Amino acid sequence: MARPPWLVVVFSRWPVPGRCKRRLAQAIHPVPAAAIQSRLLIHVLSLIQPLVREGLVHLHLAVTGAGPKAWRRWLTPLDHSPPEITLRPQGGGNLGCRMARQVRWGLSQNYRGVVLLGSDCLGLEVGDLRQALQLLSLGQKPLVLGPALDGGYWLMGQRCFESCLFSGLPWGNNTVEALTRSRARAVGFQVHRLRPQADVDRLQDLQPWLAEV
């Protein structure tokens, strides 16, 4: 019997003015900020599609800011429309609670493991995702982190659930990724790190992209 695939969970806010990219919107106006959010999300979804077609992953979109019906209408004109994407609300609580909810659900569905992925990373490539899956196959209790330049992380992958990775962390602080690594090692994870990347949250985060257009 074939092994079940990995589950990739992409977190995203509703990409309309006033509902996303609030820090960036203060610098460039809510309308272009929302357009950037849309572009980033489409970029991330497009990178996952080859892995979906190969049967390596199932794609799940954890959403907030609008209900699943509105999200399906937004996705339908794209190449990344249902049934290739399953949709679930992120639910309430802080970021740690919302991430933990998705991991527990994914592991309860007997996936090989769960990869949590943000939708704010301009430099993400499909090779980064393949590397994450390869590292998740190593050892008995691997944890894969994609460190962000602001001290957080843009990817987290695991094959088993530990609540200490999600509770009591200073979300939004520049120590989150380091604290997560420390806690993970303390409870027996083999921690693997991908290349550091920048999330697009502020105007200066757009400079590498603006230099290429």
Image: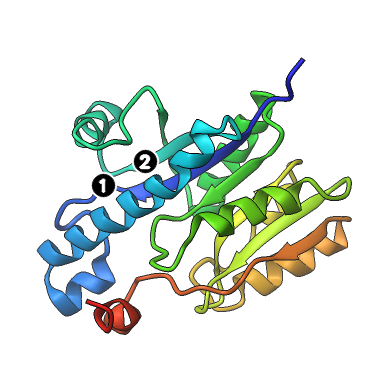
Q: Position of residue 206 (x, y in %)?
A: 30, 78
Dividing the picture into quadrants, the one containing residue 122 is: bottom left
Q: Vertically, is 114 above or below 96?
A: above
Earlier in the chain: of badge 2 and badge 1, it is 1
Q: Which quadrant is the C terminus positioned in?
A: bottom left
Q: Which mark is residue 14?
A: 1
The residue that label 2 is drawn on is 63
Badge 1 amino acid: Trp
Which of 71/26 is in front? 71
Residue 169 in view here: no
Q: Position of residue 169 (x, y in %)?
A: 62, 64
Please name the residue shown 51% across and 45% down the image: 98
Badge 2 amino acid: Val
Please name the residue shown 42% across and 38% down the image: 61
Pointers 2 and 1 in contact (CB under 8 A)?
Answer: yes
Q: Position of residue 106 (x, y in %)?
A: 61, 32
